[in-house]
Amino acid sequence: MNEPLDVLIAGAGPTGTTLAIDLLRRGLAVRIIDRAPHSFDGSRAKGIQPRTLEVFDDLGALDDVLAGSSDYPRLGIHLGPVTVPWRMFRNRERSADIPYPNTRLMPQYRTDSVLHDRLEQLGGRVEYGRELTGFDQDGTSVTATVLGDDGPGRITARYLVGAEGGSSAVRKHLGLGFLGETHDQDRMLIVDAVTDGLSRTRWHVWPGVKGRFAGACPLPDTDLFQWMIRLAPDEEQPEGEEAITRRIRAHTRNRRLAVRDIRWRSVFRPNIRLAEAYRGGRVFLAGDAAHVHTPAGAQGLNTGIQDAYNLGWKLAQVLAGADPRLLDSYEAERLPIAAGVLGLSTAKYEGLAKLDPSSLRRGKDEQQLSLTYRGGPLAPGDGDHTTTLRIGDRAPDAGLLAPDGTAVRLFDICRGPHFTVVAYGPEAAAASKELDWPAAGAQLRRVAVDAPTDPGHGFRRVYGIEGDTLLLIRPDGYLGHIATRDFLGSTRAAARAMTPAVAG
């Protein structure tokens, strides 16, 4: 009998593909299936947040994302004959601790393409036209029933992850509730099309009564706009270029506008839902299968990618022999994040209907750099801390000097599937050298920082270092431990919860 796969992933959107990339680079046996006949060809989710750019940096996909995206254009709010410029984001200069400070605009089909290319570079591929219809599980594996062109088949894996969207068959088969509401009367027509008579230097918005706005966002490196037209409750949705053009002209009062060459269209209904749990035995949910959002604030895709980035290293560690209770921390860390993001995106969307200008602004909350796992099972609230950071916080970037005097970023050192221990000061450095580490699972990279390697004290300032400090950075870039005393003992204890046992 063949050995089962390590992980079967259902759903090849950004969430599922991110997870597959992370698992493949850790050497795991992975299959990723999708019921669609081909990759998604629409622009649906188009905002890539700074924290997600950091994930793509770690996964080796950032250069292609930056090449295929742009900064967000300013809004042009059309009020009759007057157009009011409005900056949705305050563009920031990169800094030592935040290398990618601005949200990028990129249509989802291009994000999918970049991730699928990276997947193939690692030896994986998406199996399209294969739909998961059910599964059985026991104490050691999950066996899924998959329907494809060649009929039904069975795939056995040690773990199954459902990342196949809001209508997730995996979630339904687990019998998990999807708590929240769907606003069936609130519909938004979304159309990707070439548009005549419209400048590409602005994201155009035409407010309307009762929140019936229309908007047109230029998609970077294309000749397309994404149109968003909020329909009245009893309005019949327009079909075809002529009908959509008439609808746009009626709302904007601009007879020069016309759409043609429609590439993709969809009708969106606000779904605001959260799964009651992220796990059932050896089966997990991620992305829209676990939480669905309004489109406001560009949160859904980014939250799903963060789910995958959190889950990947934990699955790999448990498969390598770590305590299976590590997997309980996935839901404990990610479900509260999704609940908070749901509230944020819902408030932004409701503000659009009220013509609230603040609903058009985007700031640090949307960028996901300040999200933290403080107080979770891997980040006890009573642990050591620095003046700026606590266990569970994102580990900031910093500029350092290597021993040979060349400049290096901390993110360069952390890039890859390993843990990183950073020692500041001689006592912490001595403890770092003595820290034993298991041969199985994610390995450990050690770096010592002192005054000569921290020019201008940038690392010390950003990390809030006051004296000797030992920092353990998890594979997903969050602080797994901070020690300002008992360097060796406390760090060993923290590592045991996330790693296989050390031999001998």
Image (cartoon, helix red, strand yellow):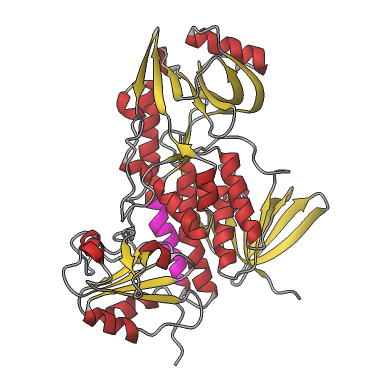
Q: Is residue 24 above or below residue 300?
A: below
Residue 407 in sight in this render = yes
- Residue at image position (21%, 64%) is 457
**Between 95 and 132, which is closer to the camera in this rendering?**
95
In the foreground, 504 or 245: 245
Quadrant of the drawing holding the N terminus: bottom right
- Residue 445 found in image quarter: bottom left
Percent coordinates x, y for residue 157 in the rendering:
65, 66
Range of magenta residues? 325-336
- Name the residue rendered at 76%, 51% in the picture: 147
Task: Give coordinates of residue 181: x percent, y percent.
Answer: 46, 34
Asked whether 330 or 169 is in front, the reply is 330
Q: Farthest residue to the left: give it.
A: 466
Left or right, 355 with respect to 216, comes to: left
Quarter of image, res 496: bottom left
Left or right? Give the position of 280 relative to 337.
right
Task: Give how far across and how far down residue 136 sits, in percent.
Answer: 65, 61
Give the answer, above or below, for where 112 lies relative to 89.
Answer: below
